[in-house]
Amino acid sequence: MAIVLVGVNLLFERVFYFMFGWWGKGLEVDLGSGEITVKQLPREILEMYLGGRGLGVKLLWDYLPAGIDPLSPQNVLIFAAGPLTGTRTPAAGRHAVVAKSPLTGTIFDGNAGGYWGTALKKAGYDYICFKGRAASPVFLMVRGERVSLENADFLWGKNTGQTMKLLGDRFSAESKGTFKYRFSCIGRAGEKGVAFASIMSDSGNVCGRGGLGAVMGSKNLKAIVVGGGKRVPIADDDVFARYRRDILRLLVASPVSSKGLSSFGTPVLVNLINYMRLLPTNNFRSVYFPEADEISGEKIRDNFERKKKACYGCPIACKARAGEMEIPEYETLALLGPACNNSSLESIMEINTLCNDYGLDTITTGATLACYAEILGKNLQREEMLELIRQVGENEGAGAQLAGGSAFLAAKRGKPEAAMQVKKLELPGYDPRGALGMALGYATSNRGGCHLRAYMIGPEIFGKPKLLNRLTLADKAGLLPVFQNFFAAMDSLVVCKFVTFGAGEEELAAILGSVTGVYYSAQDLLRIGERIWNLERLFNQREGFSAGDDTLPERFFQDSADGYAGGIDRDEFLRALREYYFYRGWTEEGIPSAEKLAQLEIEV
């Protein structure tokens, strides 16, 4: 095949105003025509949606017609930073990616840490929006104001590790001082259209869930290389420095962030969640795993030399490597371990490495393997799991059915009850029978079965910001929307959720104001999150989702097989769901009311 360079016509729309925190502009890339346009962002849109998730949701709502195939050229893929990205705000080095999900059909956002989001911001842009489909593989090159589409034939067919190395070798000479190139890419799973393919940034930071890597692959977009050396403008440096010190002090004072996560990373959760009888075992049929200590943070500490890694500006440094391998996150340990009846830490680390290389979401991978094992009525052994994952990554053989996720697999096999999912997104590492606020959070999540829409494990297990009775739904219906709104705002700033173990909406609103020069109260921040949440709900309803999708797999209304957890009371759950709609200001059918939309200034 002949190598064809992609021609680029770079157009600029002049920005006539100056901002703090935001640049007020983004790149819109038409991959079909090769045209790249610098677009001005209205200030009111930024103030209403902030950036990251919120900005991506707003753009997707405006750009995307209803009913499109997520893997068609019509889908839009948006990478967005937030107003705090690139500043020295603790743990604000993240970025968000937003598109319609090929796994769930819902609106979907993922976010990742590392340094890529900061590089985008320091290049002078708030977002990049990709439309259409390139005729042949390409990558986007952003060198500040110099932007181009480049031939990616030399990268196509490579997994993420090799792709990162090739890009690193190619651009190492130019990556110096404050101007460092950062890479975001897909592996072969994204190229092959696997419904839960992920996007890797900075070798170890993943937008993992929902198949956003498959959307990227469907556009023949292999990677995005970004570099810039601009300083993000801050309205009041002295006030910013004071609020930054306050947040750092709160994170140091919190044992969860300064001791647990900093010393062990998220694997510190394994023994605690098992002790509380929430650890998904045997495809969520049980809640207690007798061999949990074999895959715990303590076991990792005792058996591996743990080299810590920190994302940009993060004092916690929860990530770590052991030699050449990434130490798995808690969710990965839970879903590739107990959920699959696997107590071998070494095999989980090996499987995690393979998933990251192919670009596969480890939560959906583990849950789909557990579903497959239940359907077959057997336990999968290490070599069998590794081979299945290779086949999933290649979307071939037995892996082709698994490549659609657990809901697709279970429906094909005539066993839909074996898929532990909500809105086709597999549940993560917390059995909802032991944390009922989390149960309601799973059911009402706009992107499906997700713990990060509202991390109710914080109050129900850690007592942050205050301890709640985890075994009741009483009062959760009114509290859950507050957490959901807050996390939507955090995903739009974009700030790591671990910050909540120290700081809250008051501290984040204050530091946001010092950066942007726009006054935000804590209530303003929550209102922005509420606006984003309601717009996501409207998007899903436009795609055919309804109140009937706000539920849980039947398994969780029954006692666990090991007898450690009682089933969720269905009547109590349905009553809490109705109360949730009431507190949201929605109709009994779960539809945002005209009054609520008017309050939030959402025009439809």
Image (tube, rainbow, N blue to C red):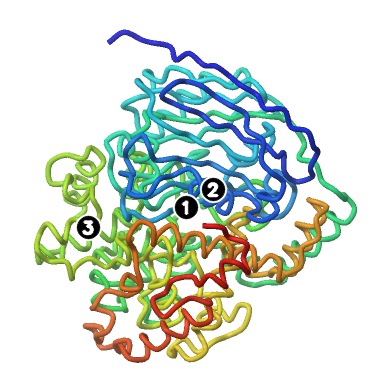
Marks 3/2: CA–CA distance: 32 Å
Query: Who comes first in sequence, dot 3 or dot 1?
Result: 1
Is residue 411 positioned above or below 397 on the image? below
Q: Residue at x 53, y 77 (%)?
A: 585
Q: Specify the label residue 369 is tagged with.
A: 3
x%, y% of residue 145?
67, 23
Element type at mark 2: helix
For mark 3, give the secondary structure.
helix
Q: Are marks 3 and 2 in contact (CB under 8 Å)?
A: no
The first of marks 3 and 2 along the sequence is: 2
Q: Judge from the rendering whether residue 292 lies leftward or rightward of residue 496; answer left or right.
A: left
Question: Which residue type carries mark 2?
Answer: Gly
The N terminus - image quarter? top left
Outermost residue to the top:
2
Q: Are marks 3 and 1 in contact (CB under 8 Å)?
A: no
Question: Which numbered tag is attached to residue 56?
Answer: 2
**Residue 134, quarter of the rendered image:** top left
**Label 1 Cα crowd, 10 Å radius (few <14 / some 14-19 / many 20+):** many
Disc 1 marks a residue whose amino acid type is: Asp
Please identify, in this view, whether the residue under mark 3 or under mark 2 is nearer the observer: 2
In percent of width and height, residue 155 lies at 39, 23
**Residue at 31% in and 27% down:** 157
Closest to the observer: 416 or 295? 416
Label 1 secondary element:
strand
Which residue is depicted at the point 38% across and 68% down?
429
The CA distance from mark 2 to mark 1 is 8 Å
Instruction: From the image, tell me which residue sits under label 1.
Output: 109
* Snapshot quadrant of residue 295: bottom left
Residue 161 higher or lower than 308, as above or below: above
The residue at 82%/46% (across/down) is: 234
Tell me whether the residue at label 2 lies in contact with that at label 1, contact meaning CB atoms closer than 8 angstroms.
Answer: yes
